[in-house]
Image: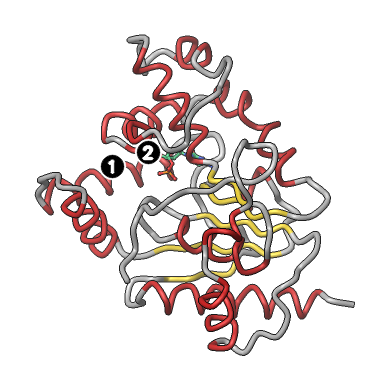
């Protein structure tokens, strides 16, 4: 199995089914056994997963949500939805006020393939640098993180801004080269032609924009656990994430 975009799930309050339905129980059990976990029920835990594009953070977050039976929010989708709104009505991504207008009535179909298209990815990266756009999306994410039963959120600023008091924070990363290879494979699997050098350049410029912006830049929270997936398979990355989270939760238990 390789890293990939895969289906994205979001939990209650975000208009989607609980994510635990999407990973077969047999798979959850074998992963749990692999990493020596006994009890996959974690009530009320908030798990923050941050990292750069194509690091595998979405895959890891979905697997954690599935394993611990927690609702999941892919916060990048919110920025992508704003970008798609803006793109559809021909708004200017270089104008913060137009981007802010695109935050109104943010209903969207998370299965819409255009949400993950290249132009929308680029616009999402641009408009996510605007403080007004980030402020407009803040409450929705904090409400999701604050729900009583706990939650898993993935993005760029979950551990630093959205849920600074999360029970566990993971920062998932991989080298730019490995991420570019994964993204290239993903594009090819979708029947799109792309060149490695272009994909790598795109990953690097997105990293620069995400990490270089003034408000809520992409960065590892001081108390986040680092998970470098550069040399890991998907299964290994998930197993390592489960192990790290379990260890941190066990340490925090009374
Ligand atoms: O994770 P993603 O690639 O789907 O995110 C799309 C864009 O949204 C990305 O360029 C960075 C931005 N983003 C952000 O600024 N903060 C988040 N919490 C999530 C995504």
**For mark 1, what is the residue?**
205
Q: Residues within 10 Å of mark 1 (few under 14, many from 20)?
A: some
Image coords of residue 210 (percent x, y): 42, 41
Residue behind label 2 places its C-beta within 8 angstroms of ligand 1 = yes
Cβ atoms at labels 2 and 1 below 8 Å apart: yes
126 vs 188: above or below: above
Query: If the image is split into quadrants, where does the N terminus sit?
Result: bottom left
At x 42%, y 38%, the residue is: 111
Camera-side residue: 110 or 54? 110
211 vs 126: above or below: below
**Side of 13 relative to 254 (left or right):** left
Q: Could you tell me how far apart the alpha carbons at marks 2 and 1 are, in whole angstroms?
A: 6 Å
Image coords of residue 168 (percent x, y): 68, 65
Image coords of residue 189 (percent x, y): 19, 54
Image coords of residue 39 (percent x, y): 73, 80
**Side of 24 relative to 126 (left or right):** right
**Side of 151 relative to 106 (left or right):** right
**For mark 2, what is the residue?**
209
The local secondary structure at tag 1 comes to helix
């Amino acid at each position: 199995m390789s890293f990939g975009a895969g289906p994205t799930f979001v939990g209650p309050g975000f208009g989607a089914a609980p994510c635990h339905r999407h990973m077969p129980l047999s798979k959850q059990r074998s992963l749990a056994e692999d990493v020596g976990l006994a009890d996959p029920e974690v009530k009320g835990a908030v798990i923050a997963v941050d990292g750069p594009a194509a690091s595998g953070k979405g895959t890891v977050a979905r697997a954690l949500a599935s394993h611990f039976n927690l609702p999941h929010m892919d916060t990048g989708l919110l920025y992508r939805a704003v970008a798609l709104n803006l793109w559809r009505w021909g708004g200017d991504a270089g104008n913060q006020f137009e981007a802010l207008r695109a935050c109104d009535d943010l209903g969207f179909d998370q299965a819409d393939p255009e949400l993950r298209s290249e132009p929308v990815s680029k616009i999402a990266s641009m408009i996510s640098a605007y403080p007004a756009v980030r402020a407009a999306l803040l409450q929705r994410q904090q409400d999701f993180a604050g729900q009583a039963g706990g939650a898993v959120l993935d993005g760029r600023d979950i551990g630093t801004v959205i849920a600074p008091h999360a029970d566990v924070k993971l920062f998932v990363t991989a080298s730019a080269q490995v991420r570019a290879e994964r993204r290239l494979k993903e594009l090819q699997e979708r029947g799109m032609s792309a060149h490695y050098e272009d994909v790598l350049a795109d990953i690097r410029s997105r990293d620069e924009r995400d990490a270089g912006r003034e408000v809520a830049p992409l960065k590892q929270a001081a108390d986040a656990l680092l998970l470098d997936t550069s040399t890991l398979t998907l299964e290994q990355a998930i197993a390592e994430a489960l192990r790290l989270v379990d260890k941190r939760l066990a340490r925090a238990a009374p």
